[in-house]
């Protein structure tokens, strides 16, 4: 079983990993910042799942502010993009509708789930 994966979730060997992903900038999925708080989503290439299930090879992390070092991991780039948008929307007070301008309505449930997960993690009540 491989611990290294390409962006599509296919197992790869270490040689392929180092040659294809040595440029860190190519691993960025999203990066937004405001008032010293950064939300960064990257392709990890290494499975960060401990246990059964698909490899977790994408990660959103918050750097700075009261949620410093909070992170979420994802199995697909699509999930990572949606999770990034939900974290940005929550942290930077953008409305859910703003996310849907980026991701069309077919992703509404995924966006809602990601946004709800962020609110639960941070114990936000409306």
Image (cartoon, rainbow, N blue to C red):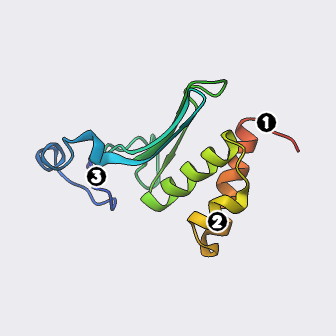
Counting residues from the N terminus, which is met first, the one under dot 1 or under dot 2? Answer: 2
Q: What label sits on residue 34 in the rendered view?
A: none
Query: Dot 2 corresponds to which residue?
Result: 100
Q: Position of residue 47 (x, y in %)?
A: 36, 44
Residue 110, image quadrant: bottom right
Q: In the image, is residue 64 above or below residue 80? A: above
Q: Say which residue appears at 45% left-offset and 55% top-offset.
A: 75
**If you read the primary sequence from the N terminus, does the residue marked by circle 1 or circle 3 appear first?**
3
Q: Mark 3: which secondary structure?
A: loop
Foreground label between 1 and 2? 2
Circle nearer the N terminus (2, 3): 3
**Residue 123: mark in rendering:** 1
| Circle 2 crowding by C-alpha within 10 Å: few under 14, some 14–19, many from 20 | some
Say which residue appears at 33% left-offset and 62% top-offset: 8
**Helix, strand or loop status at disc 1:** loop
Cα–Cα span, label 1 and label 3: 33 Å
Separation of residues labelled 1 and 2 (CA atoms): 23 Å
Q: Quadrant of the C terminus?
A: top right
Q: Residue furthest bottom?
A: 106
Task: Find residue 26 and report its horizontal and vertical position in percent.
Answer: 28, 48
Q: Is residue 3 visible?
A: no
From the viewer's perspective, is residue 53 above or below residue 62?
below
Residue 50 spot, x, y in % from top left: 45, 40
Q: CA distance from mark 2 to mark 3?
A: 29 Å
């Amino acid at each position: 079983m491989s611990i290294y994966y390409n962006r599509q979730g296919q197992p790869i060997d270490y040689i392929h990993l180092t040659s294809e992903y040595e440029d860190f900038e190519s691993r960025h999925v999203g990066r937004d910042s405001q008032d010293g708080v950064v939300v960064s989503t990257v392709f990890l290439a290494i499975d960060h799942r401990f246990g059964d299930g698909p490899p977790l090879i994408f990660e959103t992390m918050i750097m700075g502010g009261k949620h410093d070092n909070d992170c979420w991991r994802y199995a697909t780039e699509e999930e990572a993009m949606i999770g990034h948008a939900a974290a940005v929307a929550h942290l930077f007070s953008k409305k859910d509708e703003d996310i849907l301008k980026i991701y069309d309505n077919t992703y509404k449930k995924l966006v809602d789930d990601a946004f709800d997960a962020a609110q639960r993690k941070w114990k936000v009540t409306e």
